[in-house]
Image (spheres, helix red, strand yellow):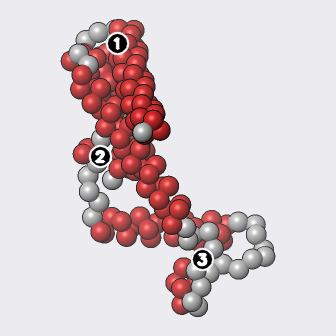
């Protein structure tokens, strides 16, 4: 859910849980696309096997197995992205109501600035200006937060070195 939220640019709470049927359908569609791409390609040489054929033969598909280091790095990346999203959404909540509504509409829900302007009864330029101001505030807050985190980490490391 976190990875889908990052791709869609919204909170993990806004992403609905997928049913097992949906997940299986997505996997089926991916395999169908792969098979279609293979048969439509101009490649003549090479051997194509399904995952089941490889597992049945006692072999691991090449390029599909990730090392434990890769798995840890992916998990760390996902955790870092989720933390960034949480920080951004926390900063959005701190914005004035008008800016918060515009940011949610344009950046989270994907509405155009023109649509937001019509909905709010203001000009598109006003929406653009409010959006720019809000994004500037969010960036500044995140930048300040990362500097504080970096300074805290640096001071903790320096204290350890002194002792």
Say what secondary structure mark 3 lies in.
Answer: loop
| Within-10-Å neighbours for mark 1: few <14, some 14–19, many 20+ | some
Q: Tell me which residue sits at (29%, 26%) in the image.
A: 91
Q: Where is 118 relative to 107, above or below?
A: above
Where, by quadrant of the figure, is residue 7 drawn? top left
Determine the residue located farthest toward the bottom in the rendered image: 57
- Picture disc at residue 105: none
* Residue identified by numbered label 3: 61
Q: Is residue 72 above or below residue 141?
A: below
Tell which tag, 1 or 2, sits nearer the viewer.
Answer: 2
Q: Mark 1 points at which residue?
A: 130
C-alpha gap between disc 1 and disc 2: 26 Å
Q: Do the residues labelled 1 and 3 touch (CB within 8 Å)?
A: no
Q: Where residue 12 is drawn, which disc sits there? A: 2
Who's the residue at 26% across and 19% down the image? 95
The quarter in which the C terminus is drawn is top left
Q: Which one is earlier in the sequence, the residue at label 3 or at label 2?
A: 2
């Amino acid at each position: 859910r976190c990875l889908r939220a990052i791709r869609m640019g919204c909170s993990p709470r806004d992403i609905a849980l997928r049913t097992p049927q949906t997940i299986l359908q997505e996997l089926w569609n991916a395999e169908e696309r792969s098979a279609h791409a293979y048969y439509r390609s101009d490649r003549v040489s090479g051997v194509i096997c399904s995952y089941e054929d490889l597992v049945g033969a006692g072999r691991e598909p090449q390029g599909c197995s990730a090392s434990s280091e890769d798995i840890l790095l992916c998990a760390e990346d996902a955790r870092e992205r989720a933390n960034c999203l949480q920080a951004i959404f926390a900063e959005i909540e701190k914005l004035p109501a008008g800016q918060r509504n515009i940011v949610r509409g344009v950046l989270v829900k994907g509405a155009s600035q023109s649509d937001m302007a019509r909905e709010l009864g203001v000009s598109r330029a006003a929406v653009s200006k409010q959006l720019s101001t809000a994004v500037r505030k969010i960036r500044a807050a995140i930048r300040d937060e990362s500097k504080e985190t970096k300074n805290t980490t640096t001071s903790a490391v320096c204290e350890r070195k002194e002792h």
